[in-house]
Image: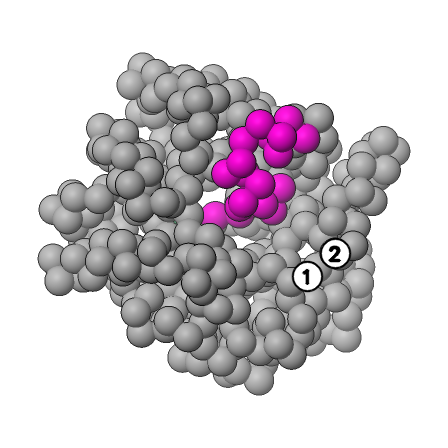
Amino acid sequence: MRASDKNYIKNLVKLARHDQILNPLVVTFHITSACNLNCFYCEDFGARLNSQLPPPLPLKDSMRVMEIIRQATDNIVFTGGEPMLYPQIDELVAKAKLDLGFESISILSNGSLLDQHESLLVYIDRLVISLESSDQASLQSVTNASSKITEKIIDNIKHYSKRQGELGFVMIINCVLTPETISEAEQLLEFCLEHNLIISFSPQAVNNWPRYELLISSEFKLFIAKLQELKKRGAPILGSYAYLKTLEDFNPFQCYPSLVPRVMPNGDLIYPCRPIEKENGTHGGRPCNLLEVNSWEEALNIAYDQFGPPPRVCTSCFQQCFAEPSLMQARPFSHLRELLLFPSSRKAKLSTYSPG
Ligand SMILES: C[S@@+](CC[C@H](N)C(=O)[O-])C[C@H]1O[C@@H](n2cnc3c(N)ncnc32)[C@H](O)[C@@H]1O
Ligand code: SF4
Ligand code: SF4
Protein backbone atom coordinates (compact mmCIF):
# COMPACT_ATOMS: atom_id res chain seq x y z
CA MET A 1 0.00 0.00 0.00
CA ARG A 2 1.25 3.49 -0.80
CA ALA A 3 2.63 5.65 2.04
CA SER A 4 0.00 8.35 1.55
CA ASP A 5 -2.85 5.77 1.64
CA LYS A 6 -1.38 4.30 4.83
CA ASN A 7 -1.29 7.79 6.30
CA TYR A 8 -4.95 8.31 5.37
CA ILE A 9 -5.89 5.16 7.30
CA LYS A 10 -3.63 5.95 10.27
CA ASN A 11 -5.22 9.41 10.38
CA LEU A 12 -8.69 7.87 10.78
CA VAL A 13 -7.44 6.22 13.98
CA LYS A 14 -5.85 9.48 15.10
CA LEU A 15 -9.11 11.33 14.49
CA ALA A 16 -11.01 8.77 16.56
CA ARG A 17 -8.57 9.64 19.38
CA HIS A 18 -9.16 13.39 18.81
CA ASP A 19 -5.54 13.88 17.80
CA GLN A 20 -5.13 17.23 16.02
CA ILE A 21 -1.77 16.38 14.46
CA LEU A 22 -2.38 14.16 11.44
CA ASN A 23 0.16 12.56 9.12
CA PRO A 24 0.78 14.37 5.83
CA LEU A 25 -1.04 13.23 2.70
CA VAL A 26 1.07 15.43 0.46
CA VAL A 27 3.82 18.04 0.83
CA THR A 28 3.77 21.22 -1.24
CA PHE A 29 7.19 22.50 -2.26
CA HIS A 30 7.39 26.07 -3.60
CA ILE A 31 10.39 25.30 -5.74
CA THR A 32 10.92 28.90 -6.87
CA SER A 33 9.47 32.32 -6.05
CA ALA A 34 10.06 33.63 -9.57
CA CYS A 35 7.15 34.15 -11.94
CA ASN A 36 6.71 35.44 -15.48
CA LEU A 37 3.10 36.64 -15.08
CA ASN A 38 1.34 39.13 -12.84
CA CYS A 39 -2.09 37.66 -12.10
CA PHE A 40 -4.09 40.42 -10.46
CA TYR A 41 -5.34 38.19 -7.62
CA CYS A 42 -1.93 36.74 -6.69
CA GLU A 43 -0.73 38.25 -3.42
CA ASP A 44 2.55 36.44 -2.71
CA PHE A 45 4.17 36.02 -6.13
CA GLY A 46 4.27 37.64 -9.57
CA ALA A 47 6.90 39.04 -11.93
CA ARG A 48 6.64 42.44 -10.19
CA LEU A 49 7.99 40.85 -6.99
CA ASN A 50 10.81 38.79 -8.55
CA SER A 51 13.63 41.08 -7.42
CA GLN A 52 12.34 41.17 -3.81
CA LEU A 53 12.04 37.41 -3.34
CA PRO A 54 14.93 35.02 -2.62
CA PRO A 55 16.57 33.04 -5.44
CA PRO A 56 15.84 29.30 -5.68
CA LEU A 57 18.15 26.70 -4.16
CA PRO A 58 20.74 24.95 -6.33
CA LEU A 59 19.64 21.52 -7.57
CA LYS A 60 21.77 19.66 -5.00
CA ASP A 61 20.09 21.50 -2.09
CA SER A 62 16.60 21.13 -3.56
CA MET A 63 17.29 17.40 -3.82
CA ARG A 64 18.30 17.29 -0.14
CA VAL A 65 15.08 19.12 0.81
CA MET A 66 13.13 16.56 -1.24
CA GLU A 67 14.92 13.67 0.45
CA ILE A 68 13.62 14.95 3.79
CA ILE A 69 10.12 15.48 2.34
CA ARG A 70 10.17 11.92 0.98
CA GLN A 71 10.42 10.63 4.56
CA ALA A 72 7.02 12.24 5.22
CA THR A 73 5.12 11.14 2.12
CA ASP A 74 5.37 9.75 -1.40
CA ASN A 75 3.17 12.56 -2.74
CA ILE A 76 4.68 15.88 -3.73
CA VAL A 77 3.27 19.04 -5.31
CA PHE A 78 5.68 21.43 -7.01
CA THR A 79 4.44 24.98 -7.10
CA GLY A 80 5.92 28.47 -7.06
CA GLY A 81 6.02 31.20 -8.30
CA GLU A 82 6.11 29.45 -11.62
CA PRO A 83 7.81 26.05 -11.15
CA MET A 84 8.76 25.82 -14.83
CA LEU A 85 11.13 28.75 -14.14
CA TYR A 86 13.22 26.65 -11.75
CA PRO A 87 16.51 26.42 -13.67
CA GLN A 88 16.78 22.60 -13.65
CA ILE A 89 13.09 21.74 -13.37
CA ASP A 90 13.23 18.85 -15.88
CA GLU A 91 16.09 17.18 -14.05
CA LEU A 92 14.54 17.84 -10.65
CA VAL A 93 11.22 16.22 -11.56
CA ALA A 94 12.92 13.22 -13.19
CA LYS A 95 15.06 12.71 -10.06
CA ALA A 96 12.01 13.07 -7.79
CA LYS A 97 10.46 10.13 -9.62
CA LEU A 98 13.44 7.95 -10.48
CA ASP A 99 15.89 8.57 -7.61
CA LEU A 100 13.64 9.52 -4.69
CA GLY A 101 10.69 7.31 -5.59
CA PHE A 102 7.85 9.80 -5.27
CA GLU A 103 4.76 7.87 -6.34
CA SER A 104 2.63 10.86 -7.18
CA ILE A 105 3.98 14.12 -8.55
CA SER A 106 1.86 17.16 -9.30
CA ILE A 107 2.89 20.46 -10.82
CA LEU A 108 0.94 23.69 -10.48
CA SER A 109 1.78 25.91 -13.41
CA ASN A 110 0.50 28.83 -15.43
CA GLY A 111 1.07 26.77 -18.58
CA SER A 112 3.05 29.40 -20.50
CA LEU A 113 6.31 27.39 -20.64
CA LEU A 114 4.86 23.92 -20.96
CA ASP A 115 6.15 23.33 -24.49
CA GLN A 116 9.71 24.02 -23.29
CA HIS A 117 9.44 21.33 -20.59
CA GLU A 118 7.60 18.56 -22.36
CA SER A 119 10.18 16.02 -21.19
CA LEU A 120 9.02 16.23 -17.54
CA LEU A 121 5.43 15.33 -18.36
CA VAL A 122 6.14 11.58 -18.41
CA TYR A 123 7.16 11.74 -14.73
CA ILE A 124 4.14 13.56 -13.38
CA ASP A 125 0.66 12.42 -12.47
CA ARG A 126 -1.23 15.69 -12.40
CA LEU A 127 -0.68 19.01 -14.08
CA VAL A 128 -2.82 21.76 -12.55
CA ILE A 129 -2.95 24.86 -14.74
CA SER A 130 -4.32 28.21 -13.60
CA LEU A 131 -6.86 29.54 -16.08
CA GLU A 132 -9.71 31.97 -15.54
CA SER A 133 -10.84 32.33 -19.13
CA SER A 134 -10.40 30.58 -22.45
CA ASP A 135 -10.73 33.97 -24.14
CA GLN A 136 -7.36 35.54 -24.85
CA ALA A 137 -8.29 39.15 -24.19
CA SER A 138 -9.85 38.28 -20.82
CA LEU A 139 -6.85 36.14 -19.91
CA GLN A 140 -4.62 39.11 -20.69
CA SER A 141 -6.51 41.26 -18.21
CA VAL A 142 -6.13 38.55 -15.52
CA THR A 143 -2.44 37.80 -16.09
CA ASN A 144 -1.27 41.23 -17.29
CA ALA A 145 0.67 39.35 -19.99
CA SER A 146 1.10 40.03 -23.70
CA SER A 147 -1.22 38.46 -26.26
CA LYS A 148 1.71 36.32 -27.42
CA ILE A 149 1.97 34.74 -23.95
CA THR A 150 -1.77 34.23 -23.43
CA GLU A 151 -2.00 32.71 -26.92
CA LYS A 152 0.82 30.33 -25.96
CA ILE A 153 -0.94 29.38 -22.71
CA ILE A 154 -4.17 28.45 -24.51
CA ASP A 155 -2.30 26.66 -27.33
CA ASN A 156 -0.26 24.68 -24.81
CA ILE A 157 -3.37 23.63 -22.91
CA LYS A 158 -5.11 22.52 -26.11
CA HIS A 159 -2.04 20.67 -27.39
CA TYR A 160 -1.11 18.83 -24.17
CA SER A 161 -4.73 18.05 -23.29
CA LYS A 162 -4.66 15.74 -26.33
CA ARG A 163 -1.52 14.01 -25.08
CA GLN A 164 -2.63 13.19 -21.53
CA GLY A 165 -3.11 9.47 -22.26
CA GLU A 166 0.11 9.08 -24.23
CA LEU A 167 2.26 10.88 -21.61
CA GLY A 168 0.35 9.45 -18.64
CA PHE A 169 -0.81 12.50 -16.71
CA VAL A 170 -4.13 14.16 -15.91
CA MET A 171 -4.63 17.83 -16.68
CA ILE A 172 -6.71 19.94 -14.31
CA ILE A 173 -7.71 23.56 -14.79
CA ASN A 174 -7.83 25.62 -11.59
CA CYS A 175 -9.98 28.71 -11.94
CA VAL A 176 -9.86 31.43 -9.30
CA LEU A 177 -13.38 32.81 -8.96
CA THR A 178 -13.33 36.58 -8.60
CA PRO A 179 -16.06 39.19 -9.17
CA GLU A 180 -14.23 40.01 -12.43
CA THR A 181 -13.93 36.42 -13.73
CA ILE A 182 -17.09 34.68 -12.54
CA SER A 183 -19.11 35.63 -15.64
CA GLU A 184 -16.66 33.60 -17.79
CA ALA A 185 -16.67 30.50 -15.60
CA GLU A 186 -19.43 28.63 -17.45
CA GLN A 187 -17.70 29.17 -20.78
CA LEU A 188 -14.49 27.87 -19.20
CA LEU A 189 -16.33 24.76 -18.07
CA GLU A 190 -17.46 24.23 -21.68
CA PHE A 191 -13.84 24.63 -22.82
CA CYS A 192 -12.79 21.94 -20.31
CA LEU A 193 -15.49 19.56 -21.50
CA GLU A 194 -14.41 20.09 -25.10
CA HIS A 195 -10.73 19.43 -24.29
CA ASN A 196 -11.12 16.54 -21.84
CA LEU A 197 -9.94 18.55 -18.84
CA ILE A 198 -11.01 18.39 -15.20
CA ILE A 199 -11.85 21.73 -13.60
CA SER A 200 -11.70 23.06 -10.09
CA PHE A 201 -12.78 26.42 -8.73
CA SER A 202 -11.23 28.34 -5.83
CA PRO A 203 -12.70 31.56 -4.47
CA GLN A 204 -10.25 34.45 -4.60
CA ALA A 205 -8.58 34.86 -1.23
CA VAL A 206 -7.65 38.32 0.00
CA ASN A 207 -5.51 38.21 3.13
CA ASN A 208 -6.41 34.50 3.40
CA TRP A 209 -10.18 35.05 3.50
CA PRO A 210 -12.56 34.92 0.48
CA ARG A 211 -12.87 38.33 -1.12
CA TYR A 212 -15.71 40.30 0.46
CA GLU A 213 -17.58 40.91 -2.81
CA LEU A 214 -17.80 37.12 -3.26
CA LEU A 215 -19.10 36.59 0.26
CA ILE A 216 -22.09 38.80 -0.48
CA SER A 217 -22.51 37.96 -4.18
CA SER A 218 -25.73 36.24 -5.27
CA GLU A 219 -24.03 35.43 -8.60
CA PHE A 220 -21.34 33.50 -6.71
CA LYS A 221 -23.92 31.59 -4.62
CA LEU A 222 -25.95 30.69 -7.71
CA PHE A 223 -22.84 29.52 -9.53
CA ILE A 224 -21.77 27.27 -6.65
CA ALA A 225 -25.29 25.76 -6.53
CA LYS A 226 -25.10 25.21 -10.29
CA LEU A 227 -21.71 23.49 -9.96
CA GLN A 228 -23.22 21.00 -7.51
CA GLU A 229 -26.02 20.27 -9.96
CA LEU A 230 -23.59 19.88 -12.88
CA LYS A 231 -21.33 17.65 -10.82
CA LYS A 232 -24.27 15.39 -9.99
CA ARG A 233 -24.99 15.15 -13.72
CA GLY A 234 -21.41 14.05 -14.44
CA ALA A 235 -19.52 17.27 -15.25
CA PRO A 236 -15.76 16.82 -14.61
CA ILE A 237 -15.65 19.09 -11.56
CA LEU A 238 -12.90 18.34 -9.08
CA GLY A 239 -14.08 20.21 -5.98
CA SER A 240 -15.74 17.64 -3.73
CA TYR A 241 -19.46 17.86 -3.13
CA ALA A 242 -18.70 18.50 0.57
CA TYR A 243 -16.37 21.37 -0.36
CA LEU A 244 -18.87 22.95 -2.76
CA LYS A 245 -21.51 22.77 0.00
CA THR A 246 -19.24 24.63 2.42
CA LEU A 247 -18.61 27.26 -0.28
CA GLU A 248 -22.34 28.04 -0.49
CA ASP A 249 -22.33 29.84 2.86
CA PHE A 250 -18.63 29.67 3.76
CA ASN A 251 -19.52 27.32 6.59
CA PRO A 252 -16.63 26.76 9.00
CA PHE A 253 -14.84 23.42 8.65
CA GLN A 254 -12.53 21.52 10.96
CA CYS A 255 -9.07 22.20 9.56
CA TYR A 256 -6.05 19.87 9.81
CA PRO A 257 -3.13 21.82 8.35
CA SER A 258 -0.63 19.05 9.13
CA LEU A 259 -2.20 17.07 6.24
CA VAL A 260 -0.59 19.46 3.74
CA PRO A 261 2.73 20.84 4.99
CA ARG A 262 4.38 23.52 2.89
CA VAL A 263 8.06 24.15 2.17
CA MET A 264 9.32 27.48 0.83
CA PRO A 265 11.92 27.95 -1.97
CA ASN A 266 14.85 28.25 0.47
CA GLY A 267 13.86 25.03 2.28
CA ASP A 268 12.03 26.66 5.22
CA LEU A 269 9.22 24.54 6.65
CA ILE A 270 6.00 26.47 7.27
CA TYR A 271 4.16 25.47 10.43
CA PRO A 272 1.30 24.89 10.93
CA CYS A 273 0.15 26.67 7.74
CA ARG A 274 0.88 29.63 5.52
CA PRO A 275 -2.03 31.86 6.73
CA ILE A 276 -0.94 31.56 10.37
CA GLU A 277 2.72 32.04 9.45
CA LYS A 278 1.81 35.22 7.57
CA GLU A 279 0.16 36.67 10.68
CA ASN A 280 3.62 36.83 12.29
CA GLY A 281 2.15 35.84 15.65
CA THR A 282 3.18 33.29 18.24
CA HIS A 283 1.07 30.41 16.87
CA GLY A 284 3.17 29.54 13.86
CA GLY A 285 5.99 30.48 11.56
CA ARG A 286 9.10 28.93 10.06
CA PRO A 287 10.51 26.68 12.77
CA CYS A 288 13.40 25.28 10.73
CA ASN A 289 15.03 24.87 7.37
CA LEU A 290 14.98 21.33 5.97
CA LEU A 291 18.63 21.72 4.89
CA GLU A 292 19.56 21.96 8.56
CA VAL A 293 17.82 18.86 9.91
CA ASN A 294 18.57 15.17 9.58
CA SER A 295 15.00 13.95 9.26
CA TRP A 296 11.37 14.97 8.78
CA GLU A 297 10.68 13.82 12.34
CA GLU A 298 13.36 16.15 13.67
CA ALA A 299 11.83 19.07 11.72
CA LEU A 300 8.37 18.36 13.20
CA ASN A 301 9.75 18.04 16.72
CA ILE A 302 11.40 21.45 16.36
CA ALA A 303 8.07 22.85 15.10
CA TYR A 304 6.01 21.38 17.98
CA ASP A 305 8.56 22.54 20.57
CA GLN A 306 8.43 26.06 19.20
CA PHE A 307 4.74 26.51 18.38
CA GLY A 308 2.82 23.65 20.00
CA PRO A 309 0.09 21.66 18.21
CA PRO A 310 -1.97 23.24 15.42
CA PRO A 311 -5.17 25.05 16.51
CA ARG A 312 -8.07 22.82 17.50
CA VAL A 313 -10.65 25.15 16.05
CA CYS A 314 -9.67 27.66 13.41
CA THR A 315 -11.74 29.76 11.03
CA SER A 316 -8.92 32.02 9.93
CA CYS A 317 -8.96 31.13 6.25
CA PHE A 318 -10.88 29.33 3.56
CA GLN A 319 -8.22 28.01 1.25
CA GLN A 320 -9.11 25.05 -0.90
CA CYS A 321 -5.67 23.48 -0.42
CA PHE A 322 -6.41 23.05 3.30
CA ALA A 323 -10.20 22.75 3.20
CA GLU A 324 -10.40 19.92 0.67
CA PRO A 325 -7.96 17.47 2.30
CA SER A 326 -9.33 18.33 5.75
CA LEU A 327 -12.90 17.58 4.66
CA MET A 328 -12.01 14.38 2.82
CA GLN A 329 -9.93 13.11 5.73
CA ALA A 330 -12.38 13.97 8.51
CA ARG A 331 -15.44 12.75 6.59
CA PRO A 332 -14.48 9.34 5.18
CA PHE A 333 -18.06 8.61 4.13
CA SER A 334 -18.20 11.81 2.08
CA HIS A 335 -14.87 10.78 0.58
CA LEU A 336 -16.16 7.32 -0.26
CA ARG A 337 -19.34 8.79 -1.76
CA GLU A 338 -17.19 11.15 -3.81
CA LEU A 339 -15.07 8.30 -5.15
CA LEU A 340 -18.07 6.11 -5.91
CA LEU A 341 -20.25 8.74 -7.55
CA PHE A 342 -17.83 11.11 -9.25
CA PRO A 343 -15.18 9.61 -11.58
CA SER A 344 -13.29 12.92 -11.95
CA SER A 345 -12.43 12.89 -8.25
CA ARG A 346 -11.06 9.36 -8.63
CA LYS A 347 -8.88 10.44 -11.55
CA ALA A 348 -7.46 13.44 -9.74
CA LYS A 349 -7.02 12.03 -6.19
CA LEU A 350 -9.14 14.45 -4.32
CA SER A 351 -7.87 13.70 -0.81
CA THR A 352 -4.50 15.15 -1.77
CA TYR A 353 -5.86 17.92 -3.94
CA SER A 354 -3.84 20.97 -3.22
CA PRO A 355 -3.71 23.97 -5.53
CA GLY A 356 -1.88 26.78 -3.82
C1 LIG B 1 0.50 30.74 -6.50
S1 LIG B 1 0.14 29.77 -7.91
C2 LIG B 1 1.71 29.03 -8.27
C3 LIG B 1 1.73 28.09 -9.43
C4 LIG B 1 1.60 28.68 -10.81
N1 LIG B 1 2.33 29.88 -10.99
C5 LIG B 1 0.15 28.86 -11.16
O1 LIG B 1 -0.29 30.01 -11.31
O2 LIG B 1 -0.56 27.86 -11.26
C6 LIG B 1 -0.74 28.39 -7.28
C7 LIG B 1 -2.25 28.47 -7.36
O3 LIG B 1 -2.73 29.45 -6.47
C8 LIG B 1 -3.83 30.10 -7.07
N2 LIG B 1 -3.97 31.42 -6.46
C9 LIG B 1 -3.07 32.43 -6.50
N3 LIG B 1 -3.53 33.50 -5.84
C10 LIG B 1 -4.75 33.15 -5.34
C11 LIG B 1 -5.72 33.84 -4.56
N4 LIG B 1 -5.55 35.10 -4.17
N5 LIG B 1 -6.85 33.17 -4.23
C12 LIG B 1 -7.05 31.90 -4.63
N6 LIG B 1 -6.16 31.20 -5.37
C13 LIG B 1 -5.02 31.82 -5.73
C14 LIG B 1 -3.45 30.12 -8.54
O4 LIG B 1 -4.54 30.27 -9.38
C15 LIG B 1 -2.78 28.79 -8.73
O5 LIG B 1 -3.71 27.80 -9.12
S1 SF4 C 1 -0.93 32.82 -9.83
FE1 SF4 C 1 0.90 31.75 -10.53
S2 SF4 C 1 1.22 32.62 -12.59
FE2 SF4 C 1 -0.12 34.01 -11.55
S3 SF4 C 1 1.25 35.56 -10.66
FE3 SF4 C 1 0.83 34.00 -9.08
S4 SF4 C 1 2.51 32.59 -9.23
FE4 SF4 C 1 2.48 33.78 -11.13
S1 SF4 D 1 -8.24 27.32 8.68
FE1 SF4 D 1 -6.51 28.23 7.53
S2 SF4 D 1 -5.41 29.44 9.06
FE2 SF4 D 1 -6.69 27.97 10.20
S3 SF4 D 1 -5.43 26.15 10.53
FE3 SF4 D 1 -6.55 25.82 8.62
S4 SF4 D 1 -5.15 26.52 7.00
FE4 SF4 D 1 -4.44 27.39 8.94
User: Residue 55: within the magenta?
Assistant: no
- Callouts 1 and 2 close, C-beta under 8 Å: yes
Residue at numbered disc 2 = 2
| Label 2 Cα crowd, 10 Å radius (few <14 / some 14-19 / many 20+) | few
Q: Residue at x 41, y 42 (%)?
A: 198
Give the percent coordinates (x, y) of residue 246.
52, 23
Q: Amino acid at mark 1?
A: Asp
In-front residue for pair 259/205: 259
Q: Position of residue 70 (x, y in %)?
A: 69, 67
The quadrant holding residue 47 is: bottom left
- First-in-chain label (1 vs 2): 2
Q: Secondary structure at mark 1?
A: loop
Magenta residues span 336-355
Tell me if residue 147 comes above or below residue 22 in the rendering. Answer: below
**In the image, what residue type sits under mark 2?**
Arg
Q: Residue at x 50, y 38 (%)?
A: 344
Magenta span contains residue 338: yes
Does residue 229 lie above or below 192 as drawn?
A: above
Residue located beneath label 1 in the image: 74
Q: Position of residue 327 (x, y in %)?
A: 63, 32
Q: Is residue 231 above or below residue 311?
A: above
- Tell me if 6 is positioned left or right of 159 in this view: right
* Residue sitting at x 42%, y 52%: 171
